[in-house]
Image (cartoon, rainbow, N blue to C red):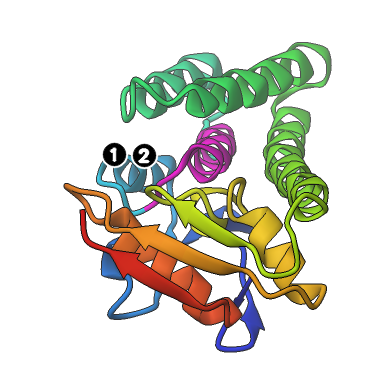
Amino acid sequence: MKVEGTHYRTVWLEGGTVVMIDQVRLPHEFGVVRLPAHRETAEAIANMTVRGAGAIGAAAGFGMAQGVLEAPEEGCRAYIEGAARRIEATRPTAQNLFYAVERVRGAATAALEEEGLQAARQRAVSEAQSIADEDVEACKRIGEHGAALLPGRARVSTHCNAGWLAFVDWGSALAPIYVAHRAGKQPFVWVDETRPRLQGARLTAWELTQEGVPFRIVCD
């Protein structure tokens, strides 16, 4: 999605550094944080710098890839397992997180056994990127299918944030609204405030502003 005309994903990997939108600072300030090691990425997941099932899963996958990249030749298996446990401990209810950790760890372990640590590092990064890309594609499809169900002047009520910021791109419940709006329909969104963290008022409303979709916040 776009922020002041520039396309962003919520989280991505640059070399061995995880970069993510800092959701704690929204809506008053937009910025990204750069996390050079898996410990920093784990902390960002734990303190809710990144939020939402898909975004947490992608961050966990990239963090696990960082763990593999950091692993030394001697004791690499123990280091990788330690990184997995650290990331898994951040958000014990986030199933996307466990799925991503296991998928990247499994890919890296298989490559490690067959070809060595360098191959494991490459495979870990590739697998983590695939998780993020698959999230984007799934959300885009939700948007396309859902937009077809919306009338030209739909009035939609939302709860919490199930938009772009909660995933890697597009979002789930908000994706149909975005696709419909870009196709020329005129959806209007009632955004509930969503106590106690106000993720509707802070995040959903901010996203809709960026896309130019009209809305009103409902105090709850």
Q: Which residues are magenta?
A: 50-68
Amino acid type at circle 1 is: Ala
Please state the horizontal and vertical placement of residue 95, each as a whole percent of the image. 49, 22
The residue carrying mark 2 is 42
Kindly tell me whether residue 10 is visible in this rendering: no
**In the image, residue 45 above or below residue 21:** above
The residue carrying mark 1 is 46
Q: Foreground residue, 99 or 201?
A: 201
Q: Nearer the viewer, mark 2 or mark 1?
A: 1
Q: Crowding at label 1, few (<14), some or many (≥20) Cα neighbours within 10 Å?
A: some
Distance in Å between CA atoms under marks 2 and 1: 6 Å
Taking the image as shown, residue 61 lies to the left or right of residue 103, namely: left
Please state the horizontal and vertical placement of residue 73, each as a whole percent of the image. 58, 26
Q: Quadrant of residue 8?
A: bottom right
Q: Is residue 64 magenta?
A: yes
Q: Foreground residue, 115 or 66?
A: 66
**SS category of the residue bearing label 2:** helix
Please state the horizontal and vertical placement of residue 114, each as a whole percent of the image. 83, 13
Amino acid type at circle 2 is: Ala
**What's the magenta bit mostly, secondary-structure-wise?**
helix
Taking the image as shown, residue 175 lies to the left or right of residue 194, namely: right
**In the image, residue 172 above or below residue 93:** below
| Residue at x-position 36% and y-position 42% | 45
- Mark 2–mark 1 contact, CB under 8 Å? yes
Q: Foreground residue, 7 or 46?
A: 7
Q: How many marks?
A: 2
Residue found at the very far left of the displayed protein? 196
| Residue at x-position 52% and y-position 78% | 214
Q: Which quarter of the rendered picture does the N terminus lie within? A: bottom right
Q: Is residue 1 magenta?
A: no
| Residue at x-position 53% and y-position 80% | 210
| Residue at x-position 73% and y-position 56% | 150
